[in-house]
Amino acid sequence: MPQYLLKCEDVHKSFGITKALDGVDFCVERGKIHGLIGENGSGKSTLANIIGRIYAADKGKFTLRGETWTPKSPQEAFSDGVSIIVQETGTILSITVAENLFLGRYEEFSDGFIVNAGKMEKAADQILSSIGVTSIYGSQMTARLNMQQRKIVEIAKAVSNDPDLLIADETSNILSEEGREILFRLFDKQIKNNKSVVTITHNIEEAMELCDTLTILRDGKVTATLNKEEFDENRIKSLMIGREIKDSFYRTDNDEYGEEVVLRMVDATSLRDVTRVSLELHKGEILGIGGLAESGMHTLGKMLFGAERLACGKVECNGKTVDSPETAVALGIAYISKDRDVESLAASTNVSANIAITGTDVNVISKFIYSVKKEKKYVLDQIERLKIKVNSRFDKVSSLSGGNKQKVAFAKWFARDCQIYIMDCPTRGIDIGVKQEVYRMMYQLKQQGKSIVLIGEEMAELIGMSDRIIILKEGRISREFRRSEGVTEDKLIHSMF
Amino acid sequence: MKEKIQRFINSELFENLLPVLILIMMTLLFAILTGGRFMSATNIKLIINQATVIALIATGAVFVYSSGKMNIAMGSTTCVTVMIGILIYARTESLPMTFVGSIIASIGIMACVVFLSNLLHLDMQALTTMLMVFMQSIQSIVLVKGSWAIPYSTVIPLQKANIPMIMLFAYFIIAMFLYDFTPIGRNLEYIGENRTCAQLTGIKLNKYVALSYLFCSVGIGLGAGAFIIRNASIGPSSGSSLNMDVILAMVLAGSPLKGGSKSKIYSGIIGALISVGLGNGLTMLGIGSYYIQIIKGILFLVILISTSKRPDSLPVKQML
Ligand SMILES: Nc1ncnc2c1ncn2[C@@H]1O[C@H](COP(=O)(O)OP(=O)(O)OP(=O)(O)O)[C@@H](O)[C@H]1O
Ligand SMILES: [Mg+2]
């Protein structure tokens, strides 16, 4: 007889006319890691957020530790031992790390009326070091941290209460190797203490390896719940997507690329973490860039786009210096940031405005007059091509699921005719069906003679797609691999440390 | 049924119609309370005349506010522009020269500020705060000995011909064209939604911000012209409530002060009508002008608080 920590029965949730969850049953056993997978927009985050009481369910019965459970707020769920690491940004940038960690619990540190910040920061340091993080301090301003570090603060916050149930919504895909190790160590600790974990991911290999049970959602309904011995990659995929998915995921060719250099970085040093990097991107080339989170690879992407101040060195395209995003875009360079909520999208406005913004100079009748008709086609073409799940193109971006937001970030640049695409973790959070489509589009771009810089944390993706891979280590180039050489993940990881 | 109403209330259409509904309701309410006097032809004309100056300035201001920037010096710049206009009249005795001169003067003032902002790498918003103080001191120091005026008889024919209304109409058409039918409005709104993202999309931030302030100054120049036609004079404290009136007009008509896609070009006109109508109606009901200012101030706060509604999910913060 399995011992259930949490039982959710017949959960329903609608947002306006969207039925996000339609009669979902979901039970979490003690001492187990329970995976939740499904396509973009299938309702995974909605379910997780309902368990964490960020949303209220329209209908549903919840039982925690054998008793009926009806928390009224996220704080209440948290103190009942249910912690959630949300998919979206879960930290406030304008306050310190400690304030974020103890958000809503300041009174625990107050001496009479005022909050003792020192005491709180010390407690924060303790929590951080207890999960093995020594590079982040409680007194730091959150805005100073990068995305991965902010996520680690959220992880620390989630486990600070020693929860019975830890829910991680697509947490691992923001983290790089070291971050993932921290997260998975925490998962192990939960299991050892006969507590539970719910993890949401699009990485099926990771899910199969990590989880004891998998629940697959599709259009707001559970299509199957499988135990470890029933796991089968192809079966899981077809349960997710509702059709067979062929094995060839990445490109299989060994096509060459052109001689012509389209983007050149000469001896460039940033004010942050990149030191004296020189590289060349050729016409029709997919150049992979890999490394650890702190290796400077994300900064490098921004430098190539003119969005990062250079201490010395330069970036050139077509003989012109790329010194600002304005010039970069004018030269036909596109940049898809890893931090989509802050840098890629204006979340509070609609999908149409976000996609159309890259086309305000082309969607015109004669030089000046804006054409709403052209704009509509510009936007709808992309929504269709990338299968963005919306009710109308005027849906707010903030109401989309994580993966669909990522698709909008893509759509915005694919709609415009660019020569060079700089993509920082482009497939983060998108499901395998769309991933395959994105890889196919990347290959198509290559064949059209466009060039791509692919910055990635997934080794398999870098190996699968790149013509050449550059590995950064502590802000410098540590090694370069060619597609033809027969690169392996081990070799790449080896050159990172 | 209830659900349908709920959905309608949450819809964009309703949000856009709301200012018009408020205007109609307010008019009806005052008409009843004043026993019809509010609706008399002379009073309506008075309201429209007063609202025209504000509407001219506020329509230009939509360009600035939609990108999330502010210009709190609009009222005081208008007053100084009026002074320049009167000086020009004293020299040339030509009304057309006066109006053209006013527009050039206000554009000139703003161009200086934009230039300073680029030169010193200072934010426009901060500079307009200084501009406001500067303009107000000019007005009160220069006019301390007495008001400046042009002969009232010269403006009467212009009042009769409804020139301010015609100016507003023409300016509104041009502004609407630029805002809705060229890429300008869309770019400004996107900047207002998320600056960091707008920059990483390659939008020329400096160019658009400068442009928006220049459009705003055209509205100020025209507003000054309409002011001269209406009053033919300016004293040390004339137009002191203009700063507040313009901003109130914009929020009353639903333009968010933090900018973005909810900004609408017509909100200047509707807001001006509501704001002036409110003051006028309250005066008719016998409420002192001092209290009216307080009421307007409170209204402003209430709107600010109610429009900065908390999002229903975790904060997606914007970095500035
Ligand atoms: N706050 C909201 N307002 C309106 N619709 C929403 C909201 N949150 C989610 N939805 C809708 O509910 C559906 C399910 O979204 P959910 O975020 O649960 O998907 P998901 O499975 O987590 O997808 P992803 O893998 O892309 O993160 C989507 O169609 C989404 O558009
Ligand atoms: Mg999700």
Image (spheres, coloured by chain):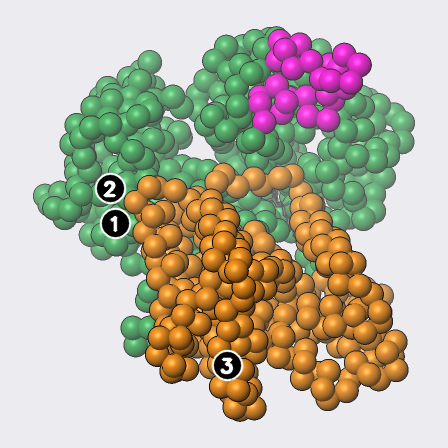
Q: Describe the element under mark 3 as helix, strand or loop.
A: loop
Q: Which chain: orange?
A: B
Please identify the quarter of the rendering in which residue A53 is found. Answer: top right
Is A117 covered by the magenta stretch? yes
Q: Residue at x 17, y 27 (%)?
A: A267
Callouts 2 and 1 close, C-beta under 8 Å: yes
Start-end of magenta stretch: A95-122
Q: Do marks 3 and 2 share a subunit?
A: no
- Residue A275 can be seen in this image: yes
Q: Which residue is mark 3?
A: B151
Is A209 covered by the magenta stretch? no
Tell me the chain of label 3. B
Residue A69 at what x, y percent from top left?
86, 31
Q: Amino acid at mark 3?
A: Pro
Q: Amino acid at mark 1?
A: Thr
Tint applied to chain A in the drawing: green
Q: Describe the element under mark 2 as helix, strand or loop.
A: loop
Q: Which residue is mark 1?
A: A327
Q: Amino acid at mark 2?
A: Asp
Which quarter of the figure is the N terminus of chain A placed in?
A: top right
